[in-house]
Image: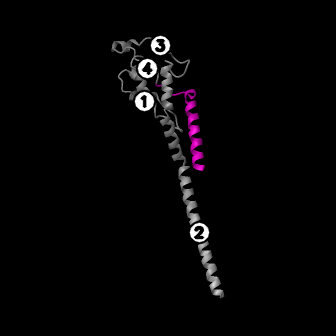
Amino acid sequence: MPAEDIFRARRAALNRKLAICKQNIVRALAKLDKLMHELNPDQLQIRIQKQVNDSGAMGRIMEARFSNQMTHVPGGVSWLPPTPKSLQKKGYKKTLVGTGKLKREAISVVMHTFWLTGDIKWEDLVQEIDLPYAEIQNEQRPFMEDPTEEELKPVYDLADLYLERELKRILG
């Protein structure tokens, strides 16, 4: 075989290897791009917040407040005293017992309030409860106070779990 043919054959083999290397690089860059997109801190934060909010963890804090009939956590102000006179004059009796509408509305309002960064504020959300006595009730027996660290601990533990799962899935 003449030297020129050997040179062409080697060159063709090198070009094939080079094409395969280029394809592998393109695939690796695509995977890296996808990985970088999924590891984007803003996107990751949004996914974790959504998972925590969809879990109902924030609503469970409010559920516990009503179940314990206390503000904040056990040891807080009891809701057991009778309905305040200001509410009785307006015809509202048994506002925290009976239908449970205030409880359902409060849970609904706080359901999607978890943020990984920044404070979780509930105090102003009482205005979003669609009941005429909610604000008066909250003044007399506060239920829309901002969640405490103790109340939020299980929520942040859940966020840690979701973050760990996301990272395992991405880096798998």
Quarter assignment of residue 124: top left
Residue 167 lies, with reference to residue 57, above or below; the image says below
* In this view, the mark in front (2 or 1): 2
Quickly name the residue at label 3.
80
Residue type highlighted by circle 2? Ile
Q: Which label was assigned to residue 18?
A: none
**Mark 3 or 2 closer to N-term?**
2
Earlier residue among tags 2 and 4: 2
Residue type highlighted by circle 1 = Ser
In the drawing, does residue 3 fall left or right of residue 70? right
Residue holding disc 1:
108
At horizontal 55% and vertical 47% (from top left) the residue drawn is 41
Q: In the rendered structure, which disc, 3 or 4, sits on the residue that comes first in sequence?
A: 3
How far apart are labels 3 and 1 at the CA level? 23 Å
Give the amino acid at mark 4: Glu
Counting residues from the N terminus, which is met first, the one under dot 2 or under dot 1? Answer: 2
Q: Nearer the viewer, mark 3 or mark 4?
A: 3
Q: Position of residue 107 (x, y in %)?
A: 44, 28
Q: Is residue 55 left or right of residue 167?
A: left
The residue labelled by disc 2 is: 20
Q: Relative to 8, does residue 68 appear above or below in the rendering? A: above
Q: What kind of residue is marked 3?
A: Leu
Closer to us: mark 2 or mark 4? 2
Q: Disc 1 on helix, strand or loop? A: helix
Which residue is denoted by mark 4 in the rendering?
139
